Image: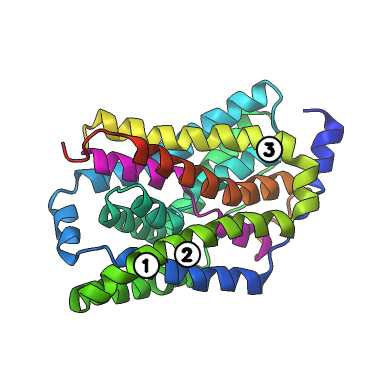
């Protein structure tokens, strides 16, 4: 990458409006309620009675994805595709837990929704420890092998954000949705389809709003980051699907692991980058911002595409 291009990208400042993020989180809670209308409580018992899929899924998210992202970043750096800050952005995204929209995408894909919810909750809970550790480990390893002078700062995950994600955005709407399905089954059945269609419209609107809010920043660097995020996201999806296939998990679980590994909570990455002073001591690092922000847009698009691909498959879901 030419020095002038790298400097232009690192000078970019991506903005994140707190009110907008709160609105998105509230709507996400309603989306999760809609997802929960199709969940049966006994299915969670089945997930933990056969924990193989849970263990493999957690390993995909917390071990394999950060490791292979580090290797991919080294490869891209060796051919001059990325700057050091873009590489750290890739590693930051890979170190974040699974994204909340993965549960919705799993429901669209006729995947194992209960497994998806469990994996999202587990990876989010472990984010307090694993996100700082993976980012510190692979970030510093990258700087060392890429011969970049500097040191990656230690992340401090805001406990309130983790609590809010697990309890408010996941726990409360899921509980209400499951209770509705259990005690008001006819109403739940009538609401499932409208909630699903409304959710698709909402996520497409999120893509448009993400573009509009940071249009200038994306226009300046989209041709440089599009391919990078595309390859990185394909790597994540492939890790989930191939690992699940190697361990011979049921087809519904393979779909779930593909989606869970391919959809990351890049919103947490943006909170760390923009809402804290953790990275204040680094040189200009717009590359981290644009990679993380574009991930937040792209994994919605790729998630909907993967759901469409899975739904075209004629193979039986039950092995």
Identify which residue, 286 or 211, lies in the foreground. Answer: 211
Magenta residue check for 152: no
Q: Say few, some or many: other residues with alpha carbon within 10 Å of mark 1 (under 14 / 14 to 19 / 20 or more).
A: many
Numbered tag placed on residue 225 in the rendering: 3
Looking at the image, is mark 3 or mark 1 earlier in the sequence? 1
In the picture, the quarter occupied by the N terminus is top right
- Which quadrant would residue 206 be assigned to in this image? bottom right
Q: Say few, some or many: other residues with alpha carbon within 10 Å of mark 2 (under 14 / 14 to 19 / 20 or more).
A: few
Majority secondary structure of the magenta segment? helix
Numbered tag placed on residue 34 in the rendering: 1
- Which quadrant would residue 76 be assigned to in this image? top right
Give the magenta part as a residue range: 250-276
Where residue 184 appears, as percent x and y from the top left, is: 22, 78
Count the numbered circles shown: 3
Residue at 12% x, 53% y is 49
Asked if marks 1 and 2 touch (Cβ < 8 Å), the reply is yes
* Residue at disc 1, secondary structure: helix
Scheme of colours in the image: rainbow
227 lies left or right of 60 = right
Looking at the image, is mark 1 or mark 2 earlier in the sequence? 1
Measured Cα–Cα span from mark 2 to mark 3: 30 Å
Q: Say few, some or many: other residues with alpha carbon within 10 Å of mark 3 (under 14 / 14 to 19 / 20 or more).
A: many
* Residue at disc 2, secondary structure: helix
Where residue 79 appears, as percent x and y from the top left, is: 68, 20
Residue at 49% x, 33% y is 234
Q: Is residue 110 shown above or below 186?
A: above
Measured Cα–Cα span from mark 3 to mark 1: 33 Å
Identify which residue, 300 or 78, lies in the foreground. Answer: 300
Residue to which mark 2 is pinned: 198
């Amino acid at each position: 990458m030419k020095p002038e291009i790298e400097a232009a990208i690192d000078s970019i400042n991506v903005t994140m409006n707190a009110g907008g993020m709160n609105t998105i989180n509230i709507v996400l809670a309603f989306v999760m309620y809609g997802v929960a209308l199709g969940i049966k409580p006994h299915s969670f018992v089945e997930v933990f009675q056969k924990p193989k899929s849970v263990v493999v899924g957690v390993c995909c998210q917390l071990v394999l994805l950060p490791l292979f992202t580090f290797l991919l970043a080294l490869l891209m750096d060796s051919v001059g595709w990325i700057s050091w800050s873009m590489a750290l952005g890739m590693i930051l995204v890979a170190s974040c837990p699974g994204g909340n929209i993965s549960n919705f995408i799993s429901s669209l894909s006729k995947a194992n929704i209960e497994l998806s919810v469990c994996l999202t909750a587990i990876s989010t809970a472990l984010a307090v420890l694993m996100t700082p550790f993976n980012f510190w480990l692979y970030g510093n390893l990258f700087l060392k092998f890429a011969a970049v002078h500097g040191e990656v700062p230690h992340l401090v995950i805001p406990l309130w954000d983790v609590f809010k994600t697990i309890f408010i955005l996941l726990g409360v709407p899921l509980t209400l949705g499951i209770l509705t399905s259990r005690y008001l089954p006819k109403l739940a059945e009538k609401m499932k389809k409208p909630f699903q269609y409304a959710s698709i419209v909402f996520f497409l609107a999120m893509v448009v709003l993400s573009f509009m809010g940071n249009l200038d920043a994306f226009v300046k660097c989209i041709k440089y980051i599009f391919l990078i995020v595309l390859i990185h996201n394909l790597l994540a999806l492939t890790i989930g699907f191939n690992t699940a296939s190697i361990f011979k998990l049921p087809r519904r679980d393979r779909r779930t692991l593909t989606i869970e590994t391919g959809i990351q909570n890049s919103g947490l990455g943006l909170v760390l980058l923009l809402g804290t002073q953790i990275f204040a001591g680094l040189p200009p690092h717009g590359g981290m911002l644009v990679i993380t922000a574009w991930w937040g847009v792209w994994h919605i698009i790729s998630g909907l595409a993967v759901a469409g691909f899975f739904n075209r498959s004629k193979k039986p879901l039950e092995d």
